[in-house]
Amino acid sequence: MSEKKFIFDNRWIGEHGIGRFAKEIRKCDLDFENISLTGNPAGKLDVLKLTLFLSLRRSKYYFSPGYNAPYFFINRSVITIHDLNHIDINSNSSFLKRVYYNYVLKRACKRALIIFTVSSFSKQRIVEWSGADDSKVIVVGNGVSEEFNENVAAYQNENPYLFIVGNRKEHKNEERALLAFLNARIPHNFQLIMTGDASQKLTDVLVKNNAVNRVKFLGKVTNKELASLYKGATCLLFPSLYEGFGLPVIESMACGTPVITSNTTSLPEVSQGAALLVDPKSLSDITEAIETIVNNEDVCISMVEKGYRQAAKFQWSKTRKIIESTIKLL
């Protein structure tokens, strides 16, 4: 066991992507204690709160399952950067985010004990952007949480449906996905179900195409509800423009549902031939993939089998093992 005692930033724990990672990593067999801070770890002033907190606990090391880092004491910190979407995607950024990334996080990458990340794609971007030593950036991957499995009860919808896990952010490419669904030559009783609330932009598309009744917005869902929605769907439609990993891909596969996703960023690495890959900027590509899934039962059967095998490769126990062995060597 490592002699280093770590303060774990459990403020990240939740049902979003980093939240699931944080929840699972907290189970590591390491000397963790929860941080005694409250508030949003991604908040504007958190770097100051965190730095002051660590200045009072000089005998402890710091572990963040997210991208927050102190300005000082970074040499006794381990941080996790899932992706660089706040740098690479303009619509996801802001002046303060860019300041934080370029003046706090880039410095942290060079001085932290270790940087964990979730894909080879993200590692490459972190090294390119920050100039950090390649050997300090460790790919630990993600896992499929226990809620997502082939035995989950399927969501009961009155019509067959395609499923989008999204949050109305531009890089999720939802408007193009919606148009592809409406253009696809598939039975008209098919619906599209989306997590999150409707946006004005998507509502306008539906009104213009006289298709309001073909799409459902379900708002926020729990992990249990999400698993049920994956299971009941004809496919997951996930043509994102940018992902550091793409948890919905393997979660859907673990539930036995075919996946349409993008041929860019981390998504080919995560799906490994078990999904239909599309050019996310090509409306016709996405449309054709939808038609293939809906109209070709043999393709669906093959993808389900491949998906189960691919999802099985991603286990939180493996992620924890990499983290434990790395930290015990520090």
Image (tube, rainbow, N blue to C red):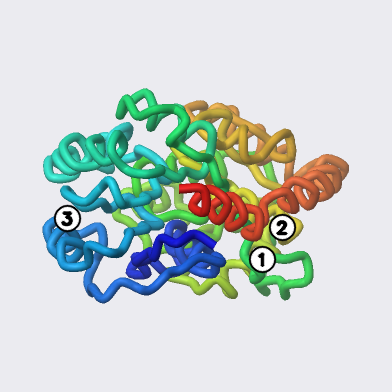
Tell whether label 1 touches label 3 (CB within 8 Å).
no
Q: Is residue 324 above or below residue 283?
A: below
Corner quadrant of residue 112: top left
Q: Which mark is residue 254?
A: 2
Q: Nearer the viewer, mark 3 or mark 1?
A: 3
User: Does any portion of residue 117 appear in the rendered image?
Assistant: yes
- In this rendering, would 273 be left or right of 1? right
Q: As rendered, which of 3 and 16 lies closer to the eye?
A: 3
Q: Secondary structure at mark 1?
A: loop
Residue flagged by tag 3: what amino acid is it?
A: Val
Q: Secondary structure at mark 3?
A: helix
* Residue at 73% over, 43% down: 293
* Residue at 87% over, 42% down: 298
**Dot 3 or dot 1, earlier in sequence:** 3
**Dot 2 or dot 3, earlier in sequence:** 3
Q: Which mark is residue 47?
A: 3
* Residue at 46% over, 68% down: 31
**Dot 1 or dot 2, earlier in sequence:** 1
Give the percent coordinates (x, y) of residue 76.
Answer: 30, 51
Give the percent coordinates (x, y) of residue 20.
Answer: 49, 63
Question: Which residue does the numbered mark 1 point to in the structure image?
Answer: 148
Q: Nearer the viewer, mark 2 or mark 3?
A: 3
Tell whether label 2 touches label 1 (CB within 8 Å).
yes
Give the percent coordinates (x, y) of residue 122.
Answer: 46, 35
Q: CA distance from mark 1 to mark 2?
A: 6 Å
Residue flagged by tag 2: what amino acid is it?
A: Ala
Q: Is residue 25 above or below residue 329?
A: below
Q: Secondary structure at mark 2?
A: helix
* Residue at 41% over, 60% down: 4
Structural crowding at the residue carrying mark 3, measured as other residues with C-alpha within 10 Å and reported as few (<14), some (14–19) or many (≥20) = some
Q: As rendered, which of 227 and 127 lies closer to the eye?
A: 127
